[in-house]
Amino acid sequence: MSDHTKAVVNLVYTANIISDKITDALKPFDVSTPQFNVLRILRGQKGKPANLSTIQERMIHKMSNTTRLVDKLIDKNFVKRHTCEQNRRKVEIFITNDGLNALIEMDKAVCEAEQQIIVELSKEELNTLNNLLDKLRV
């Protein structure tokens, strides 16, 4: 196996392990990683609404069905949707207080999982890793 193939396989394998650990951290909340991402995006709006295309643009998992994710979060009372009376195509999505409160607890669980993931790395190694990963995305 060539060095570049080994590096890419290592990245994919590691990404899957990390994804599984984050998924496990969110299980008690009955929320998927993409749903968690939607909640964080909406919290970042600081009370202002977002539309589906804004959420989709900011998603980490670009392949996610944003409408379905929002519908599931509405069912959990974590977000609400408002359709504009004058323009039925304009849909605004807000995070609810229940969603904000649940997100605080989710953040704690995910932060703990992230710390467990990187526990073996020094601050210098983390900086190097972040710099290398940033280089791969340009």
Image: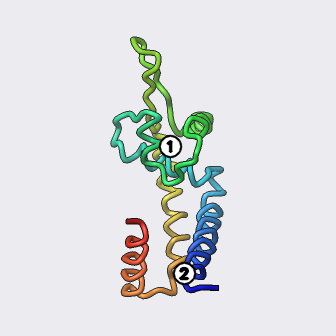
- Expressed as whole percent of the image width and height from the top left, the position of residue 129 reads 42, 80
Q: Tell me what residue is drawn at x 36 percent, y 80 percent.
A: 127
Q: Secondary structure at mark 1?
A: helix
Q: Secondary structure at mark 2?
A: helix
Q: Quadrant of the N terminus?
A: bottom right
Q: Is residue 53 left or right of residue 116?
A: left
Q: Tell me what residue is drawn at x 65 percent, y 50 percent.
A: 30
Label 1 vs label 2, nearer the camera: 2
Which residue is label 1 attached to?
Answer: 99
Would you place residue 93 above or below residue 134 in this image? above
Q: Quadrant of residue 27?
A: bottom right
Q: CA distance from mark 1 to mark 2?
A: 42 Å
User: How is colour applied across the structure in the image?
Assistant: rainbow
- Expressed as whole percent of the image width and height from the top left, the position of residue 47 reads 35, 38
Q: Is residue 68 left or right of residue 83?
A: right
Q: Residues within 10 Å of mark 2 (few under 14, many from 20)?
A: few
Q: Tell me what residue is drawn at x 42 percent, y 88 percent.
A: 122
Q: Amino acid at mark 2?
A: His
Q: Quadrant of residue 128?
A: bottom left
Which residue is label 2 attached to?
Answer: 4
